[in-house]
Amino acid sequence: MDKIPEQFEVLNNILKGREVFSNVGAVVSTSTLTRFMTAKDDNTQKQLAWGVMTDSRSVMRIHLRDFRPQVATLLSIGRKDLANMVTQDYLDAYADGLNVYIHDLSRITLASRETTPLSRTRKQNQNKI
């Protein structure tokens, strides 16, 4: 049953998506590991394989393997430089968007702490003291 979606690209994309995200998490503080490349997991339909890890300096590293048709075409005609530029641009745009999201989320969280009154539970616990 697991192989059925592979035979129908639209069904496969709906059920399994076209991307693989693999997260190593944070490495130990003594690790020298600075990159993690993942592999496509279940079929040939996957177009992007993301490897995510946090290095020993608490810096999140995101690596991308790009299997999109345009990248394959560029590689096949000897334009590895252009294929790398297309992939790097996609990765940079993703990282920029993620950084904006995290910044906005942090700003919203800080603002809500400043404007939200104490919860009932905290008020009740303070009254008991």
Image: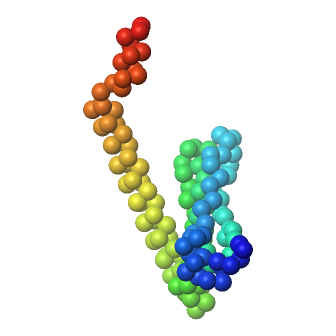
Name the residue located 42 percent from the left edge and 15 percent from the top edge: 125
Name the residue located 65 percent from the left edge and 40 percent from the top edge: 29
**Residue farthest left in this picture:** 115
The image quadrant where one finds the C terminus is top left
Q: Nearer the viewer, residue 22 or 125?
A: 125
Left/right placement of residue 85 relative to residue 3 reads left
Give the image location of residue 85, x and y in percent: 49, 76
Q: Nearer the viewer, residue 122 or 78?
A: 122
Left/right placement of residue 114 relative to residue 58 reads left
Q: Quadrant of residue 43?
A: bottom right
The image shows residue 60, relative to residue 89, as above or below, that is above
Left/right placement of residue 119 relative to residue 68 reads left
Q: Nearer the viewer, residue 56 or 71?
A: 71
Name the residue located 38 percent from the left edge and 16 percent from the top edge: 124
**Residue farthest front in this picture:** 1
Give the image location of residue 6, x and y in percent: 66, 79
Whether residue 119 is visible, yes or no, is yes
Count of marks placed on residues: 0
The image shows residue 31, relative to residue 19, as above or below, that is above
Whether residue 66 is visible, yes or no, is no
**Residue farthest top in this picture:** 129
Give the image location of residue 117, x and y in percent: 30, 27
The image quadrant where one finds the N terminus is bottom right
Left/right placement of residue 46 relative to residue 108 reads right
Name the residue located 38 percent from the left edge and 43 percent from the top edge: 106
